[in-house]
Image (cartoon, rainbow, N blue to C red):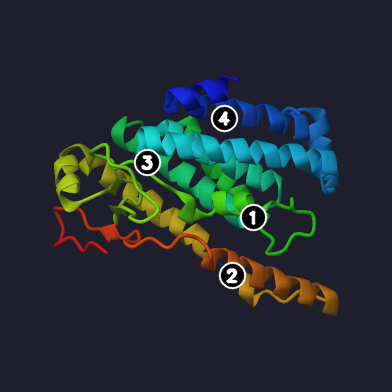
Amino acid sequence: RAIEQFTTLGDLGRLATCHHDCAGLLAVAALGEPGSQYRELRECANHALLPKQSKKLVQALRHACEALRAAELKYGRISTATAQMHYAVGRICRDGRLFSPAIHHLGQASLIYYEVWCGYARCKTHPDVTTAFESLQEAIDNYQVRDPKCVDLPRELRDAIDPEASRCKCSQCEKVETDDVRFDRCSRCKVAKYCSRECQRQHFKEHKNACKVCEPMASKIQEMRDKEPDPSSYVPDGYAPKLQHKAELAREAQRRSEMVTPRRAEGEVVPPESEAMDVG
């Protein structure tokens, strides 16, 4: 009822919070309380989820994606709320053994948390950064190209966790990305997004220090992600698994080809103090 009410009112901040709370409750219903004996035993057993558990986890992921969309539209990229929603999506994907989207969203959470806390707030470190980065490292360490115990997602939810599904508010003004036009992100910190060069110039005085602080972390996360195996180069053992993997790759390629292609795709912009900006 609260979600319906906040949707009608257009209150994106509270809507994101409601969806996030629903995602957390459903994840606990599916997997147990974090740190509980039941959850630890389930993780040690390394079994596939039961159908009832999988259904609840899919529902949790749907709410987490809705929370992320609302936070991006309300707060933009440079926000702990947006980082929190990325973290929620990443953790649920990780629990569902969907490693590639988990690594993407946990990487985004680590990067945004780092820019906000260590860049803007000038903290040396912060528990949010540590937790997100440890979860990212765990997802990379346990990565499997094709996990037979992964949760099966409907098509619309696979689209929702795709990096191309992001629709952010400009870091300077109130303009929002659309299906047709995507904004450019800062080429140094990989966090801030701008609708135009003018907005980037206006925001740079405020953004300059955080941008420099975040650059090493952005490079480190990119190096970690570069180690992610290429699914197309993976060859499973056995004739039937090979055919199944080939069919899954074909379905994924078709899904991505059918996603909305923007007239103006996301590019990168160099900070004003550097060479001339190159807007894609």
Q: Earlier in the sequence, mark 4 or mark 3?
A: 4
Label 4 or label 2, whichever lies nearer to me, is: 2
On the image, the x and y values in percent for residue 62 come to 62, 40
Question: Up-down: is 122 above or below 101?
Answer: above
Q: Earlier in the sequence, mark 3 or mark 1?
A: 3
Name the side, left or right, on which 244 lies relative to 112.
right
Q: Residues within 10 Å of mark 3 (few under 14, many from 20)?
A: many
Q: Tell me the tag on residue 155.
A: 1
Q: Residues within 10 Å of mark 1 (few under 14, many from 20)?
A: few
User: Which residue carries the number 2 mark?
Assistant: 253
User: Which residue carries the number 3 mark?
Assistant: 77
Tell me the kind of residue under disc 1: Arg
Q: Residues within 10 Å of mark 4 (few under 14, many from 20)?
A: many
Name the side, left or right, on which 210 lies relative to 95.
left
Q: Earlier in the sequence, mark 1 or mark 4?
A: 4
Question: Total number of numbered labels?
Answer: 4
Q: Is residue 229 visible?
A: no
Question: Up-down: is 56 above or below 150?
Answer: above
Task: Compute the Cα span from label 2 to label 1.
Answer: 13 Å
Badge 2 marks a residue whose secondary structure is helix
Q: Earlier in the sequence, mark 3 or mark 2?
A: 3
